[in-house]
């Protein structure tokens, strides 16, 4: 593994803890939105900025981006953060 990949994975782990350690009662918590934005960017997915998030369960959020993209951001069985693209609200995508 290259140093660049090691650093990227290390940063990803830090953001994972930041995203999922947040116990905000409101999904619109500014820190959570910022953390989800960072995680999606680290995964090299188009987003720009997360403008809303819905907690589906522990370590699992549905993030909606300013550009209209939506992602399910969660920890997979191996403990890695994954962001799966979801259809845009009211449309296909």
Image (spheres, helix red, strand yellow):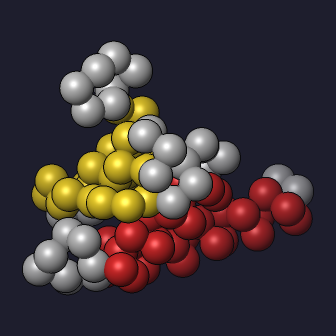
Q: x, y percentage for residue 74?
A: 34, 52
Towards the viewer: 65 or 62: 65
Q: x, y percentage for residue 85?
A: 42, 33
Residue 79 seen: no
Residue 4 falls in which quadrant of the image? Answer: bottom right
Residue 30 seen: yes
Q: x, y percentage for residue 29?
A: 28, 79
Task: Identify whether 35 is placed above or below 55.
Answer: below
Q: x, y percentage for residue 25?
A: 11, 80
Towards the viewer: 29 or 15: 29
Towards the viewer: 14 or 88: 88
In the rendered structure, the answer to whether residue 51 lies left or right of residue 38 reads: left
Task: Identify whether 15 is placed above or below 79.
Answer: below
Kindly identify the residue that appears in the image at 18 percent across and 60 percent down.
55
Residue 53 falls in which quadrant of the image? Answer: bottom left
In the rendered structure, the answer to whether residue 3 lies left or right of residue 58 reads: right
Task: Identify whether 32 is placed above or below 85.
Answer: below
Kindly identify the residue that appears in the image at 64 percent across and 57 percent down.
42
User: Residue at the top extreme?
Assistant: 92
Kindly identify the residue that appears in the image at 76 percent across and 69 percent down.
7
Kindly identify the residue that appears in the image at 72 percent across and 63 percent down.
8
């Amino acid at each position: 593994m290259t140093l660049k990949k090691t650093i990227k994975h290390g940063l990803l782990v830090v953001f994972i803890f930041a995203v999922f350690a947040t116990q905000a009662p409101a999904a619109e918590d500014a820190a959570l939105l910022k953390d989800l934005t960072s995680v999606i960017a680290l995964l090299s997915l188009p987003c720009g900025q997360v403008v809303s998030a819905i907690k589906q369960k522990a370590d699992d959020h549905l993030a909606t981006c300013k550009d209209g993209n939506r992602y399910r951001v969660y920890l997979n069985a191996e403990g890695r953060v994954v962001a799966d693209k979801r259809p845009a609200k009211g449309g296909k995508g």
